[in-house]
Image (cartoon, rainbow, N blue to C red):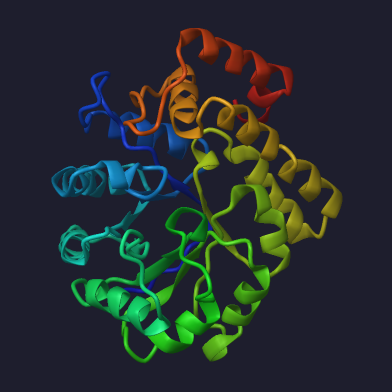
Amino acid sequence: MSAFKFSGLCTATHTPFQADGSLNLEGVEHQAAFLRSHGITSVFIGGTTGESSSLTAGERAALNDRWAVVGPAAGIDVIVHVGANCLTEAAQLAAHAEKNQAKAISMISPSYFKPRTMADLVASCAMVAKAAPRTPFYYYDIPGMTGIGGLPVDEFLKAASPIIPNLAGVKYSNPDLDAMRRAQALEGSRFDLPYGIDERFLPALRAGATAGVGSTYNFNPGPLLRTIAAHAKGDAHVAEAEQAKVQPVVDILAQRGYMGAAKALMAHLGVPLGPARLPNGNPDDAETKKMIGELETIGFFSWNF
């Protein structure tokens, strides 16, 4: 298994679509160049932000194929989300990602038929991880989306470690920082737990997180890049001030439906990614203009551009 560990900010990327909602693989190159120019050196593709549950398996494989070429050419590491309700499909996507030399793979749990026990969750992850045995595997814990609670990350790692040889850690989008601390102490602190709630990134850093995977890094990476630097220097005042620039942006977008509004913001920044697919909605031109005005009012455009 190749050595890999998340560092800094890893952007959970949007999937680019044409205006009619079809996949737009030509948009990936522009997307990658934009992210790299703003200090991003790794991407997490086909995850929640990438609307994976609204993509076909063929589209997800094609997206991976494109990033496998564009990412390395732009100096960007590619981590591929392969989770799906159908575990056979997830395993096929995992094998495909390994063939494309992804730096790592990750998966959410099936969330329609949910695993009821830790043993069922571990078995689900093991089935997928086995399909890419030479690639680091990360379980993706995001209970706010999957509805799966009561299976703490530290208990998962203890149960999964003997069964999943390529287990590298957990992509942790969970507010339970106590469980994260317990997980970090396991097996000589060998597990990697990049944090995935952008609005709570500084508390996670203080709890021992060393990297983040998030959606706001597409358009608002500056504040959290500066949060990391200030935290490393012990400058709590600057770290808190920079962290505070995340929540109001999220709030402004969420009022319009976060996914579609985020893509509209990217288009305004010169990176057209098309609309979000249903069931996510999209703001119309008037609402987008109002959103941009609210972002200007809080100083957003001076934070990154």
Expressed as whole percent of the image width and height from the top left, the position of residue 225 reads: 63, 46
Where is residue 133 drawn, in percent x and y?
22, 77
Q: Nearer the viewer, residue 69 or 16?
A: 16
In the image, taking residue 45 as reference, residue 182 lies left or right, namely right
Q: Position of residue 296 (x, y in %)?
A: 67, 17
Residue at 31% in and 56% down: 80
Within the image, what quadrant is residue 202 found in?
Answer: bottom right
Determine if residue 1 is in view.
Answer: no
Q: Is residue 23 left or right of residue 255?
A: left
- Whether residue 133 is situated above or below residue 243 in the rendered picture: below
Image quarter (top left, top right, bottom left or bottom right) of the C terminus: top right
Q: In the image shown, does 54 or 230 lie closer to the viewer?
A: 54
**x 49%, y 21%: residue:** 269
Residue 140 seen: yes
Residue that sits furthest to the top in the current view: 286
Give the number of marks.
0
**Where is residue 169 shown, x and y percent of the image?**
45, 74
Which quarter of the picture shows residue 36? top left
Q: Against 26, is 44 above or below? A: below
69 to 154, vertically: above or below: above
Q: Nearer the viewer, residue 30 or 111?
A: 111
Seen in the image, is 50 located left or right of residue 60? right
* Residue 67 location, quadrant: top left
Q: Quadrant of the N terminus?
A: bottom left
Residue at 52% across / 90% down in the picture? 187
Foreground: 63 or 121?
121
